[in-house]
Amino acid sequence: MRNEYDLELKRYLFNYYGNLLTKDEIDIWNSIIEDSKEKSFFRKTKWKNKHKDKFYRDTINRLLNEHGHDIYMNKCSICGILARTPKSKICRNGHKKVDDVWQ
């Protein structure tokens, strides 16, 4: 999960479709967030990057497999980039959506 698309997909799904997460996934996600807030030079984090990446990858795959029909992937039809939000009218490359058509 290191390329820009994966990071945007993670942000998009967790921010806008968090309601589709299981209770266990929510608990783990909250734990990762709390761990990152408490990070300091002297304190070891309990979540290693490889574990976080596996959690995000597995959760994203489950969301897309089980709830793909409920998730609206607002992708620009011109450049193919995922918009910042499901209701965005402008993609990250500046293309505009008019009457649900990217221009």
Image (spheres, grey):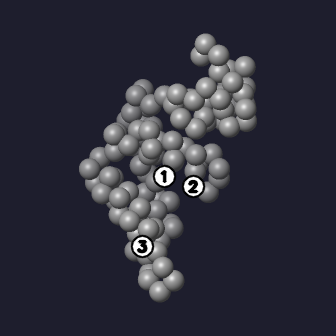
The furthest residue to the bottom: 42
Q: Residue at x 52, y 28 (%)?
A: 87
Q: Is residue 61 visible?
A: no
Q: Quadrant of the N terminus?
A: bottom right
Name the residue tied to disc 1. 57
| Disc 2, SS | loop
- Mark toward the start of the polypeptide (3 vs 1): 3
Mark pair 3, 1: CA separation: 23 Å
Q: Amino acid at mark 2?
A: Met
| Disc 3, SS | loop
Q: Amino acid at mark 1?
A: Arg
The image quadrant of residue 80 is top right
Q: Nearer the viewer, residue 73 or 87?
A: 87
Give the foreground label among 2 and 3.
Answer: 3
Q: Position of residue 23 (x, y in %)?
A: 26, 50
Q: Residue at x 57, y 29 (%)?
A: 88
Q: Position of residue 90 (x, y in %)?
A: 65, 29
Q: Nearer the viewer, residue 54 or 102?
A: 102
Q: Quadrant of the C terminus?
A: top right
Name the residue tied to disc 3. 38
| Disc 1, SS | helix
Local crowd size for mark 2, using a 10 Å CA cut-off: few (<14), some (14–19), many (≥20): some
Q: Amino acid at mark 3?
A: Glu
Say left or right for 41 vs 27. right
Name the residue tied to disc 2. 1
The image quadrant of residue 16 is top left
Q: Residue at x 60, y 34 (%)?
A: 83
Tag 1 and tag 2, C-beta contact below 8 Å: yes
Q: Is residue 94 above or below residue 52?
A: above
